Image (spheres, rainbow, N blue to C red):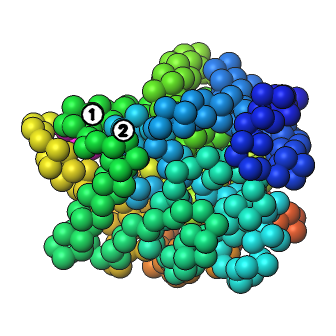
Amino acid sequence: MILGGYMSEKYVDIYKKLDMDIEKHSELMSALFQLFSDVFLTQKNRPENIKYFDWLMSEIHGKRIEELMEFKDKNKPLVGTFCIFIPEEIVVASGGACYGLCGGAQFSIPDAERDLPRNICPLIKSAYGFKVQRTCPYTQISNFIYGETTCEAKKKTWEILNDLHPTHVMHIPHMKGKREKDLWREEIYEFKNHIEEIVGKELTFEELKKGVEIINKKREALQRLDYLRSTKPDIVPISGLDSLLVTQISFYDDPERFSDKVFELCDELEERIDKGISVCESDTPRIMVIGTPMAPPNWKLHQVVETTGGIVINEEACIGHRYFKDNIDLDGVESVEDIIERMLERYMKIDCACFTPNDERIDKIIKMYREKKADGIIYYTLSFCHTYNVESKKVIDRLKEEKIPVLKIESDYSAEDVGQIKTRVEAFLESIRFKKSFKAKR
Ligand code: BJ8
């Protein structure tokens, strides 16, 4: 069991400087490490290079926070976000760090529910609860939090959160026409201005280009991992849980170090494929998970699927393919304005359910399903996420038309529904297995 050194003196000193509730934080971390150990370290036949990501997870509130303190001491921007619409390239260009604050834990929700309604999405309540509890060093260390207007619950929460921590809001339009594009461009410039205020200077063309190159490389690394885990119909060289872990860590780690480590992992996965090393039997049902993001430590669905005889080969989610699918094209850029325009084009390709219409998402899901030779899809939505929940009707109707097996799961962060989800997933995998064996006999 890896425990990390989160209670070592030097880290406790940092937590004190960040005005954290040390006792409560320690309670959170022991629960987190126990869960991590139960879910991840019990898996068999893991790639050797996954150890770096285990280590990073063990140091998520240790070494990584120590590194961010060094940024803080040098007056580099530290920005916490809740959405992949916030252009991290600009923060990286300024020499700062950008990381995700979405909450994936039940631990902080009761504290959040003192201020927020119970019937809103757990991702928001969990993150807000961490601020109330003062148990998340990433929140505490941020110069500011950057929220957005993607859903009703989020945009109203930012008003309340702003009373506890400086919070800006990026206006993300919900359609993709010319008017919306103009507004979105202004929002990106405003974000750049906020970052420049911290560093006290305008970002140069070279700095911005470098920031984009660093994040492009991170996305390329994740694209390669996504390809390798699903390219062979009979060999899966890494579990869905471990792939999810890598993607989750991409929201916290130093982006350059992270990319190098993912490339090393991918080299090993290529070797495993060549040698025929798979984490599951060749006839294991291959499942694509689509829908709302899974912030750590939300590993519930993957764990259920992979301990019930299936394997997750892809996540069509913001902690997954939607995050890394598109790079910023730097070809021929000559000015800061050119880079911002390309950035805008790239960010406008994100097919979040907050857009209407959003048919491109459905076409993409079907294309991915065929390319990855998946056997079925689980449409995963967090409870009370209206956008993904309502959009599931159109998506599932199309999947049925295409004769693609699909199961919808709506869940929160509590452990109460695990048994029920397991029963439904078991039945789903069984029906896939039956169809597969029937096809094989024909
Ligand atoms: S681009 S999916 S990260 S908004 S918070 S919408 S789950 S009710 S997270 Fe998201 Fe950006 Fe879209 Fe991706 Fe629903 Fe919860 Fe709202 Fe959520």
| Rendered image quadrant of residue 159 | bottom right
Q: How many marks?
A: 2
For the N terminus, give its image quadrant. Answer: top right
Read off the residue under disc 2: 94
Q: Secondary structure at mark 2?
A: loop
Residue 321 shown in magenta: no
Distance Cα–Cα, label 1 vs label 2: 7 Å
Residue for point 61% across, 71% down: 163
Check disc 2: other Cα within 10 Å, few if <14, some if 14-19, many if 20+: many
14 displayed left or right of 364: right
- Per the rendered image, the range of residues in magenta is 326-330
Residue 172 visible in rendering: yes
Q: Looking at the image, is 212 positioned above or below residue 316?
A: above
Check disc 1: other Cα within 10 Å, few if <14, some if 14-19, many if 20+: some
Q: Secondary structure at mark 1?
A: helix
Q: Main secondary structure of the magenta part?
A: loop
Q: Amino acid at mark 2?
A: Ser
For the residue with label 1, is its CB less than 8 Å from the closest atom of ligand 1? Answer: no
Residue for point 78% across, 28% down: 10
Residue for point 55% across, 33% down: 73
Q: Looking at the image, is 117 positioned above or below residue 185?
A: below
- Foreground: 425 or 255? 255
42 displayed left or right of 335: right
| Rendered image quadrant of residue 220 | top left
Q: Looking at the image, is 243 positioned above or below residue 428?
A: above
Asked whether disc 1 touches disc 2, contact meaning CB atoms under 8 Å apart, the reply is yes
223 displayed left or right of 27: left
Residue 327 shown in magenta: yes
Please report whichever mark, 1 or 2, sits nearer to the chain's N-terminal start: 2
Read off the residue under disc 1: 207
Relative image position of residue 271 (x, y in whole percent)? 54, 16
